[in-house]
Image (cartoon, rainbow, N blue to C red):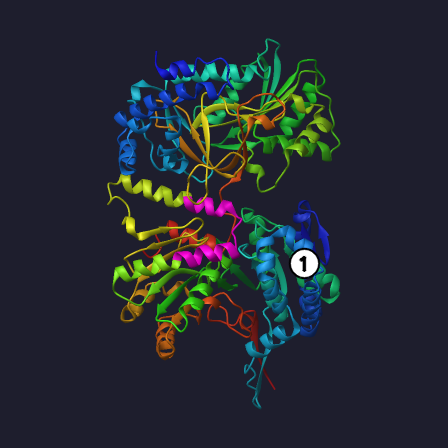
Amino acid sequence: MILFNGTLFETKEQNRLLDELPSKLTDTLLHQTLDRENVIRAFDNISQRLAAGEFESLLQSVDPDSASLYMDQIVRMMSRDYLQKKTEIEFHGVRNDNEKIQTQEVPLGVIFHIAAGNMDVLPIASIGEGLLAGNINILKLPSVDRGLTIQALKMLVDAEPALKDFIYVFDTPSSDIAAMKKLADLSDGIAIWGGDEVVHAVRAFAKPGTRLIEWGHKLGFAYISGYENEETELTELAEHILMTRQLLCSSCQVIYIDTDKYDEALSFAGRFLPYLERAFEKHPIREIGGVAELTLRRYEERIEKHLHGDEASEDKRSRFQGQHTSVTVKKDPDLELSYMYGNVIVKPLPAKNLADVLRKSKGYLQTAGLICSPEKRDALTLQLTRCGVQRVTRAGHMSSLFEGEAHDGEFALARYSRFINIEN
Amino acid sequence: MSFRSKLFSQKKIYNLEPTNELFLRAMKENCAFHYAHCEEYRKVLDGEGFSPEDLASFSDLAKLPFLPTLFFKKHHIYSLPNRRLSIKVTSSGTSGHFSRMGFAWSELWYALKMSLRVVSKRHLISLRPCNYIVFGYKPNRHNKTGVTKTAFITTLLAPARHRTYALKYHDGKYEPDLEGVIKAIEKYAKKKTPVRFMGFPSYTTFVMQMMEDRKAFVQLPKGSKIMLAGGWKQFYAEEVEKSVFYDLAKRVLGITDDNIVEFFGAVEHPILYCDCPHHHFHVPVYGRVLIRDVNTLEPVPNGTPGLVNLLTPLVKGTPLTSVMTDDLGILHDGSTCPCGQNSPYLEILGRVGLKDIKTCAAGAAEYLDKGGLK
């Protein structure tokens, strides 16, 4: 399905619509200004209808797991209060008028969003940011999109027809390089949600001068150095791990324990497993495809080790396998990806070594969930941010949404805008 | 007479329970053979603390370490010297990695006997000539994939008057020629000779949809059949239901659902599965299927989805004794199928996949592949 000018078209119309697109875009750029109030009103309308349960069946049909988990967040992200606050904060202080020259923020122009499918609402959020900055937005749907995005954007346009010339959605597969390049050529900026491979691919076909806004992949971790309330904090961390299935950039992959003793890490792992198992009961994982792939991958790695005569794989004491989840203890301190879906890694890492370890992963740092005694919090937070961490939260809130927060250390709206100067 | 030979001489192909003991012995024989002749296989079994002698009862088969299909893509391993391998078959790799399996002459003979018994259940062997539409690759000396070979072999079940291929080798690569296929279908429809379609379901669907869009409906001669192989893998993303496929075949080609026969097999597990008239893949005596829990890899009871583990003692060329596929499936009790076969039947649900869950996860997966920060 394609959304073009507020109307839905079949995929097979793609090339005809692509031919029409350049003149449509130029026409809109020259003659229309998108009023931010219209954008906020449209999203707020959808947010209210969502809260009233209007789209319940649609969401349930798409992804019952996430629908219930993220509903409150989605409603809030689209609300007037949230969006107004976001624009106030992100554009705050850019005007620096003096008598001779004035500075204005204007839209970047046309933004091509290459969205990812790890969260169903992500493509919509990306378009929302583009619209708030006043841009024309072209969205390439993630290949796994199950129809939610295009339906939601159609509703948005129906609710606020002023948006129709500012939203285009194509379900072009990434393999259709010709179409992807055409869309990229028409754009002033490309917002890329994806891993290194996607970023490399886009960099290869984007013209120099096109602004690339890369929301690359990141790894989250928790750091534990004492507790305020152990029971509550570990419960919340375990629930965060199961709720996000460790698929998000902010999800916890590794739990570092402030110690240089391997045995302490082992003892923590043994204690933490029951928390994970209980969290699974609360947030069961039904996507067996992903779980299966990671289980297979782990098995393959084990088999490979036999072949190369490595140590009879890992220390048998290091793996704590529950019914649905697991904890693996490793001696090396490096930040790495876990096997996800409730399979977390625990490593000893004394605070004095934090910087050496984290600096090795500097491009990939995002959220650190910090569990510690109150008197240590400020010092550890400072240490983490100085190492390049972008967000420090309580461990249970690693993936929570905070009003007005930046994304990966940047404000998106500023990246989707140009700041122009005009002499008086 | 080896246990393998006895197993492959079984004529009642869905007579599972009574052959369990024979199957176990043949597996033990096969496992011991590979253990003695394939260094990699021996290392894996040793590493897992398993010896062929541990196969004492039928339930021990679940404890036999399995090799994942990815393993065969990374390692081309053989238990027989080259001169004793009749052919090496390459799997149709989609990711740029290919697995290569070696087969001895003896297993080709067993495979042929097995295949003839399996296909004769669906009355596919006939002396009446047919026109063939092969939705696959036209064989050439550069192509060693199993799919190409099986697609070609199936055109021998009934004498071929003419064969049309959907994928043609041109300038070093394969190109689909679907227009050519449609022309051939229209030409064959005017004749009395039955038409047989063979190959990937995705292409077959695509051609039928093209014909439907053009309102080019035909009624193919009586006795025409669609034989599907190569898996429904390409379908998962599109989620085309089989019933949609059957309706389309009836509408566009005039082929009814009882004339649609589907095969399932893989180079890593060269046992031919053929669907019953109710389109279920019952497990033939030559192999066994274990469904394993996606977390613990322990076998699960029938009716529970999990990873599909395929076992057979057929092959001596490469240790394909117990192979773990990338597929998720369910094994259903045979009694739930009205066709009367008691053998359980395998339903493939789809491929395991992180690939389809993008961004942080997939990005992270790439990261893992590259070894990340390690």
Determine the chain carrying the residue at label 1: A
Magenta-drawn stretch contains B16: no
Mark count: 1
Q: Nearer the viewer, residue A218 or B302?
A: B302
**Magenta stretch: helix, strand or loop mostly:** helix
**Horizontal side, residue A270 vs residue B124: left or right:** left
Nearest the eye: B236 or B346: B346
A17 or A193: nearer the eye? A193
Mark 1 sits on what residue?
Answer: A152
Residue B131 placement (x, y as % from top left): 62, 17
Please tell me whether residue A288 belongs to the stretch shown in magenta: yes
- B235 displayed left or right of A199: right
Q: Splitting the image into 4 quarters, where does residue A12 fall?
A: top right
Residue B178, percent from left and from top: 62, 31
Seen in the picture, residue B23 relative to B304 is either above or below; the reply is above
Vertical comparison of B43 with A141: above or below = above
Q: Which residues are magenta?
A: A273-295
Residue B105 visible to an observer of this rendering: no
Q: Residue furthest top?
A: B127
Q: Could you say which is closer to the camera, residue B111 or residue B18?
A: B18
Q: Is residue A106 visible?
A: yes
Image coords of residue B247 (percent x, y): 70, 30
Quadrant showing the C terminus of chain A? bottom right
Which picture quadrant has residue B158?
A: top right
Q: Secondary structure at mark 1?
A: helix
A408 relative to B90, above or below: below
Please name the amino acid that badge 1 sits on.
Ala
Res B63 → quadrant: top left
Q: Viewed as shown, does residue A406 lie left or right of A309?
A: right
